[in-house]
Amino acid sequence: MKAHAKKDQTEEQNVLSQEKFDELKAELEKLITVARKEIAEGLEYARSLGDLSENAEYQAARELQAATEERIRRLEHIIKSAVIVSEKKKGLAGFGSKVTIKKKTDKEQHSYTIVGSEEADMRNHKISHLSPLGQAMMGKKKGETFTFSTPSGRQEYTIIEIS
């Protein structure tokens, strides 16, 4: 009897908001319909310049083509495995929740929106549900205290608000 390793569902699924899903689909459509055509035209022009072995424009166009095709493959995978999360559970930290937390040793509060890994953007206070902090907050209620590990040791936080 063979033992099968069960993969974590979150590795196979890309949790997205409807807005991010639509944004990625639009990007994919633009890459397929517009960017591919522009790159092909650029390659054709670069070929017309002569010797391809010393043609910097041709090399740059080939690199752009490779990067674009890789992005298309990545977007197709994300969209194919996307799970759209639109419903928030009232009073619990989860996807789409804006959670205000306070570190036990600080007076300052911080607010984060819990999102899928494709939407994570720390500059805009959007953290992935797969990050240590995101995982620690998932399913918690207002007033609840939680801990998680960081490189500088275990941290303790309290949930101040969930919206």
Image (spheres, rainbow, N blue to C red):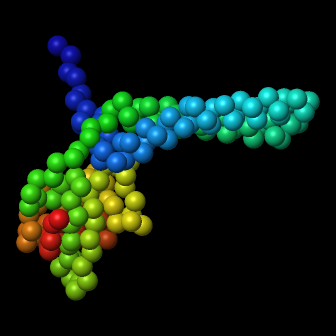
| 132 is higher (above) or lower (below) than 18 | below
- x and y, in percent, of residue 108 in the image: 26, 83
Tell me what residue is drawn at x 83 percent, y 41 percent: 56
| Residue 115, image x, y percentages | 29, 53
Q: Position of residue 80 (x, y in %)?
A: 36, 30
Q: Nearer the viewer, residue 150 or 44?
A: 44
Which residue is at the far top? 1
Residue 126: % across, % down: 33, 61
Occupied quadrant, residue 138: bottom left
**Residue sitting nearer the eye, 101 or 17:** 17
| Residue 12 appears left or right of 31 | left
Label total for image: 0
Q: Is residue 78 visible?
A: yes
- Tell me if I can see residue 66 in this picture: no
Rendering quarter of residue 5: top left
Left or right: 60 with respect to 124? Answer: right
Quarter that holds the N terminus: top left
**Vertical side of 86 occupied by 93: above or below:** below
Question: In the image, 3: left or right of 15?
Answer: left
Residue at 42% over, 67% down = 123
Please say if 2 is above or below 158. above
The residue sitting at 21% across, 16% down in the picture is 2
Q: Residue at x 76, y 35 (%)?
A: 42
Name, please, the residue furthest toward the right: 50
Image quadrant occupied by the C terminus: bottom left
From this view, report whether residue 20 is shown above or below residue 156: above
